[in-house]
């Protein structure tokens, strides 16, 4: 049973550290307005990233519920961040205004192709913030992430553009154990699944045969 959650990149954008510089896809004026320094590729970057450890409790319901609440906090903190907002604006820049489906699909495609699925450290629910993930992507990296990270990144970008979103926790085993999490986004009044983990699936796909479901409004 999951006992703790290590939340990386809490409440701030990582600062640059020693190493070779990389070219940012954003203009210097934008970096300045976002208070983002030119990022440098170095493992020492991660030594400066703040973390938060949270005790999630035990049981089939308590630990997943607490994890979803922590994800909700991360999304609330990340969606209004100017760096996240400018990323979202850039991703939908080729979509016609008020085309909600087109905007959601653009965000979905970005999350799906930009992350590589990897399981958490054993015994720990390891949640990375959108600020950390977007910084790595800006550096040209493909961050390793699990379903928590796919969900917080996608829903933060969507919420920054004004979309109503929900965190959905699901279980597929007969005993009702929760084993997966993904997002739901309201597109033109219709709640649509946002599960970008599988690269062979599109926006709106949900795994069938759910034995249990819990929705957390963000």
Image: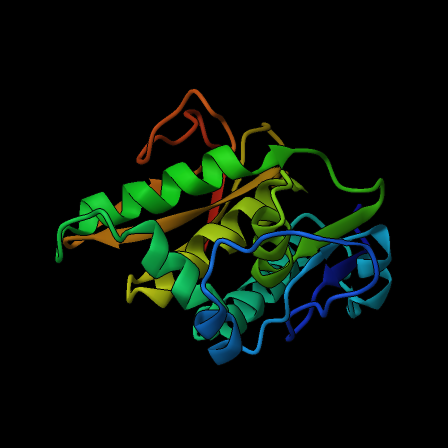
Q: Specify whether 58 is left or right of 117.
A: right
Give the residue at the far top of this rendering.
Answer: 200
Q: Position of residue 215 (x, y in %)?
A: 44, 54
Q: Quadrant of the N terminus?
A: top right
Q: Position of residue 139 (x, y in %)?
A: 63, 49
Residue depicted at x 77% and y 55%: 58
Q: Specify whether 44 is left or right of 145.
A: right
The residue closer to the viewer here, 207 or 186, is 186
The residue closer to the viewer here, 52 or 133, is 133
Q: Quadrant of residue 29?
A: bottom left
Task: Kindly tell me whether residue 218 is visible in this rendering.
Answer: no
Q: Quadrant of the C terminus?
A: bottom left
Q: Quadrant of residue 15?
A: bottom right
Residue depicted at x 47% and y 44%: 213
Residue depicted at x 39% and y 31%: 206
The residue closer to the viewer here, 109 or 191, is 109
Task: Kindly tell me whether residue 57 is visible in this rendering.
Answer: yes
């Amino acid at each position: 049973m999951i006992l703790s959650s290590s939340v990386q990149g809490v409440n701030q954008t990582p600062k640059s550290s020693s190493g070779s510089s990389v070219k940012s896809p954003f203009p210097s004026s934008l970096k300045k307005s976002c208070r983002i320094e030119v990022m440098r590729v170095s493992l020492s970057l991660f030594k400066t990233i703040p973390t938060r450890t949270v005790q999630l409790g035990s049981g089939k319901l308590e630990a997943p519920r607490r994890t979803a609440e922590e994800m909700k906090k991360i999304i609330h903190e990340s969606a209004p961040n100017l760096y996240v907002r400018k990323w979202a604006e850039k991703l939908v820049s080729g979509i016609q205004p008020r085309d909600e489906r087109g905007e959601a699909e653009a965000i979905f495609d970005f999350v799906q192709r930009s992350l590589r699925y990897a399981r958490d450290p054993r015994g720990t629910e390891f949640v990375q913030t959108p600020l950390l993930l977007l910084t790595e992507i800006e550096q040209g990296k493909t961050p390793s992430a699990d379903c928590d990270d796919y969900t917080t990144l996608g829903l933060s970008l969507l919420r920054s553009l004004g979309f109503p979103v929900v965190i959905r926790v699901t279980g597929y085993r007969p005993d009702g154990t929760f084993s997966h999490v993904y997002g739901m986004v309201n597109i033109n009044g219709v709640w649509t699944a946002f599960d970008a983990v599988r690269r062979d699936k599109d926006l709106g796909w949900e795994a069938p045969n759910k034995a249990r479901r819990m929705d957390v409004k963000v």
